[in-house]
Image (cartoon, coloured by chain):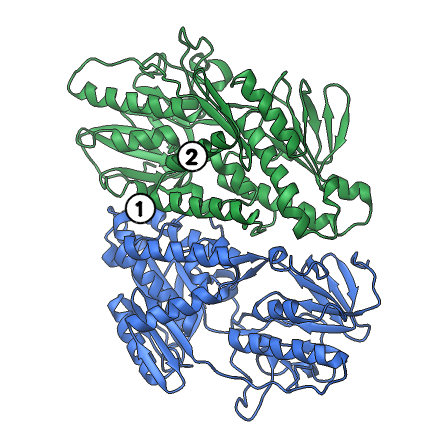
Chain colours: A blue, B green
Amino acid sequence: MYINIPETNKTRIVLVGAGFGGLILAKKLSLQHYQVVLIDRHNYHTFQPLLYQVATGGLEPGSIAHPLRKFIKSRPELILRIAEVTRIEAAAKEVYTSIGKLHYDILILATGSKTNFFGQEKLPEFAMRMKTVPQALDLRSMILQHFEEALLTSDLKERDAHTTFVVVGAGPTGVETAGALGELKKHVLPRDYPELDLRRMQIHLVEAGPRVLAGMSEQAGKRTLDFLKELDVQVWLGQPVQEYDGQTVRFASGKELRAGTLIWSAGVIGAAPEGLPDEVKGRGGRLRVDTFNRVEGLDGVYAIGDLAWMPTNDYPNGHPMVAPVAIQQAKRLADNLNRQVSKQPLKPFKYFDKGSMATIGRNRAVVDIGKVRFQGFFAWFVWMFVHLMSIVGFRNKMVVFVDWFWNYISYDRALRLIIRPFKR
Amino acid sequence: MYINIPETNKTRIVLVGAGFGGLILAKKLSLQHYQVVLIDRHNYHTFQPLLYQVATGGLEPGSIAHPLRKFIKSRPELILRIAEVTRIEAAAKEVYTSIGKLHYDILILATGSKTNFFGQEKLPEFAMRMKTVPQALDLRSMILQHFEEALLTSDLKERDAHTTFVVVGAGPTGVETAGALGELKKHVLPRDYPELDLRRMQIHLVEAGPRVLAGMSEQAGKRTLDFLKELDVQVWLGQPVQEYDGQTVRFASGKELRAGTLIWSAGVIGAAPEGLPDEVKGRGGRLRVDTFNRVEGLDGVYAIGDLAWMPTNDYPNGHPMVAPVAIQQAKRLADNLNRQVSKQPLKPFKYFDKGSMATIGRNRAVVDIGKVRFQGFFAWFVWMFVHLMSIVGFRNKMVVFVDWFWNYISYDRALRLIIRPFKR
């Protein structure tokens, strides 16, 4: 059955995904010339870079989630439907979703990426992820439940298992998560659990590759290691994880570690919907696109951001899977589609790398902007400012600011709440 | 198996429930003389009077939930366990919980109340409640899901069912919930759903008795009716609800109404744990206590607040089931138990009624303080001030203030998020 959509004789663009890229397109596509139907599985945009702070009790989910209907209220002609896209039928130009199907003239896929477990079998069942708000809330509940459960036993080995956390993957998310756990260990949990000896809490950051923050400078990586050490995080490099059964982590080296929690931030692959031919898939599940973000070989289908694989001379393996790429591609694509109406020539995409940064905890961050590199308090300040400005919506900026301010002056995380207990 | 608790030769008080009363006891009982074990099923205190604002997207759950471990951090000797109490064995002086059992010398039951469906069968399955944070979040999701679903059909009857809300019970919770829905209809939803004709959204407030806010003055009740009318809420008095199957409300009068949502705020009964003898139960599932809150006939067992049935000359049917009674009884009981140590005489409880109030929406509230009664803007201001001051924790006061301020100036509800979709 077709989804109930107002009829029109405009060209219909179906836009799937309201992440960083999708939002820009929803804002910029000309509604005078196109009927734009935005489809997302959530009724809010998620500010993913701060999900780890939701998981560690520093922020509310509502502070990093922005209602989509609020976002589009200045554009009442834009049509929004909350649904899961289940399949694309490119030959018939139809999108199948959980609420029915829909014909498109132009399809823009901005579905981002999903966690990559590299084909390991048990991991997806037992590893915690952090790609969506519910996942971050599950992790928050689980962390706190482990401490509550540690109180129930006097067997030290069991207690230790409950209070041992393994973060896999030392990219920005892994580093930031490990750092946030370090802050909990240092400032918050000892006051909450006077019955436990918090010195026994272990945080392991495990990386298969030879260094942390591989996407940033050597200098940033080195200072990050110092910062992590100050927060009592144990870093393991060149240690691929082989298996995890909910109790024991097994490394490729044969080493084993008992841990109640394993957080997987070791990589992502493109989250392509079902039904697309194999030929259009490039590296890491991403879709091959040309420099105009057109999916190769599919008429009227575009892909942007994490999902798009656009190898260029500067980026022979495709662009990094980060928000700025999605944002810039979305702007370019919106502009090109608007130009197309008046038959103006299209402009190819070129990525402008503004730099990258990661925070490791209170007063600790690393920033690379081209050749300019700095770390420590000022970097942390810059990190906060940039993130605060990037959060969608004035109210959310304000609430995040209040919470950060509060967390900073009180050495506290106010949101250590188990609202919905996590059950495996 | 016994719960793992540090050994002591102090008298052990097991305190069940961290509501308004439980928190006061946890704060005031002498830890020098007593080993106090606080048990609650959640790891946070819920500020129940504002749950309806969580349900209607005005506040975050974290703004009205206060972590218990944060609350007790200034009293590290206080022992907290998160568990569900399943049974009391008064003869053996043991409490059974989801994490094991526990011996008590003194047991204080502060478990409050639960929704009363008056023995109706289908209602508990289909009616929405608002006694806990997860219930309020479920209701929030459900309200928003109904609007998303209304978009999927062009059949007006179905659309109307999705956008018809029945609130049963015109006490403060019912009135405030209906008012909040009225605000959504007036200010928020028309901008969110330009495709729907929001004039067709219906809000019915249904009461079995002859008037709204029966616990307050005639004058308050009358102005409340005016306020509800301004917000387009339809009030039905003397209309007991007989049945609801998730689709159709059937009234005792035979009248029927199609509604996708029925919110039940028509009454509560004492939430007494299992295992207590029938003789100790008074009216409405509450436990018979003397003026020292001792449960009649049970050695060393106390009950306070909503759970306690203490008929006096002033209150022959027991005290009202409201927060101030719980708070005042908790203070008295804590004082009495501390006095008991030094063999000082106990003081009986006497309720001091400070008045009552309810808000119906933006700039609209009713306040009775003894013979002083006022309504409208100033009452609304007083209502806000009193609630803001009563919220536990400085951070939560601050965040609620920011959200109220934001909602007020923007005519918005920022938190219309379906984080976890509600499934029946």
A68 vs B355, nearest the viewer = B355
A221 vs A383, nearest the viewer = A383
Tag 1 subunit: A
A135 vs A195, nearest the viewer = A135
Q: Is residue B404 visible?
A: yes
- Residue B31 location, quadrant: top left
Side of A148 relative to B268 (left or right): left
A7 vs A294, nearest the viewer = A7
Residue visible at 67% across and 17% down in the picture: B238
Question: What label sits on residue A333 in the rendered view?
Answer: none
Quarter placement of the N terminus of chain B: top left
Q: Residues within 10 Å of mark 2 (few under 14, many from 20)?
A: some
- The residue wearing badge 1 is A151
The relative height of residue B311 versus residue B373 in the rendered view (above or below) is above
Side of A21 relative to A355 (left or right): right
**Residue A204 in the image: x percent, y percent?**
33, 67
For the residue labelled by badge 1, is the local secondary structure a helix, a strand or a loop?
loop
What amino acid type should be assigned to the residue bearing mark 2? His
Question: What label sits on residue B387 in the rendered view?
Answer: 2
